[in-house]
Amino acid sequence: MGLSDSGLGRSVSDVLAKTMRRGEPSKGYLEVDLGLITPPRANPRQDFDQSALDELAASIRQHGILQPIVVMKREVGYEILSGERRFRAAKLAGLVKVPVVIREEENPQHVAELRLIENIQRENLNPIELARAYRVLIDQHGLTHDDLADRVNKDRSSVTNLMRLLTLDEGLQRSLASAQLSMGHAKALLSCVDPIWRRTLADRIITEGLSVREAERLAKDGPPKAPVAAGERPSHVRELEANLFQLLGTRVKVTERKGKGNLTLYFDGNDQFQRVVAIMTRFVKQAGSEDRKP
């Protein structure tokens, strides 16, 4: 069933076409003070590119807003249903009034679906935003994966696979949202059982520019086995070397005697060296930011 076949899957043009109310001007929209409009309480889209907003603001200054913002009336003012990007750009452009059409919609599930569908149709959501929007519809409105797939005109496996992205840690989700990692890379990472190897592999994908096929191969192979050092060595030293090996993806040797010793890192080329340095630098910065917290 396509979007147009579902009562809850109407397009934004459908919304605009059915929003005219008795007593409104024949032009089909109202001019409303910008200060009376508030952003949506929950919008699937969270990231707004500032340079794109600046470009839209420049266009609005020259040509005005070509498509009205869809709003819902509240006790005081209006809440945006569709068009938050135009609203933000209008503020940057210094507009006092903006054109709006008023949508009488009180069903929370319907509102959430309309916002999601509008963003899907405009292809404005990154994979993490889309997955979180799916989760809201499922968790808060009781939809099954099949129901949701029907609403957004996707097959069920696509919905399920997208929502699996939310099992990645927050750092990997940020990398995926910022397009440092692709969906193909994310799928490979999800197949990694070991969380340390998953993080190490993600760092390699980003710093070395690994292809999806290379990432899939490394994910399938799993973390490399640490070489066995000759002679008996303390178990806590061997464990530390193994942990550092998985974290950095390179051989590490620790020598210790009476609380003193050395830490030696091995690398097999400039690319591996640069990757190890990048990982260590990231951890140093994280540690510094933690120390500065009150």
Image (spheres, rainbow, N blue to C red):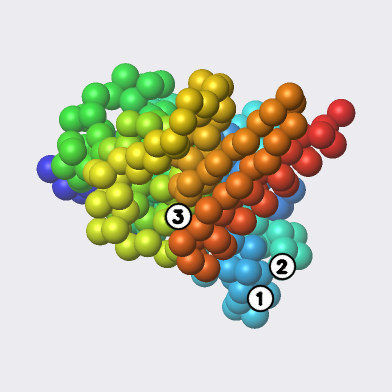
Image marks 1 and 2: residues in contact by CB distance under 8 Å: yes
Quarter assignment of residue 153:
top left
Q: Which residue is mark 3?
A: 204
Gap between marks 1 and 3 measured at Cα: 40 Å
Q: Which residue is mark 1?
A: 58
Q: Residue 128 in the image: x percent, y percent?
A: 43, 43
Disc with the residue nearer the chain's start (1 vs 2):
1
Q: Amino acid at mark 3?
A: Arg
Q: Is residue 178 above or below residue 66?
A: above
- The residue tagged with tag 3: helix, strand or loop? helix
Q: Residue 250 in the image: x percent, y percent?
A: 48, 49
Q: Residue 273 in the image: x percent, y percent?
A: 55, 61
Q: Is residue 131 visible?
A: no
Residue found 69% across the figure and 28% down from its top = 257
The residue carrying pointer 3 sits among few (fewer than 14), some (14 to 19) or many (20 or more) residues within 10 Å by Cα, namely: many
Disc with the residue nearer the chain's start (2 vs 3):
2
Q: Is residue 258 left or right of residue 214?
A: right
Disc 2 vs disc 3: which is toward the camera?
Answer: 3
Quarter assignment of residue 123:
bottom left
Residue found 45% across the figure and 55% down from its top = 204
Disc 1 vs disc 3: which is toward the camera?
Answer: 3
Q: Nearer the viewer, residue 38 or 28?
A: 38
Q: Is residue 172 above or below residue 147?
A: below
Q: Which residue is outermost to the left?
A: 1
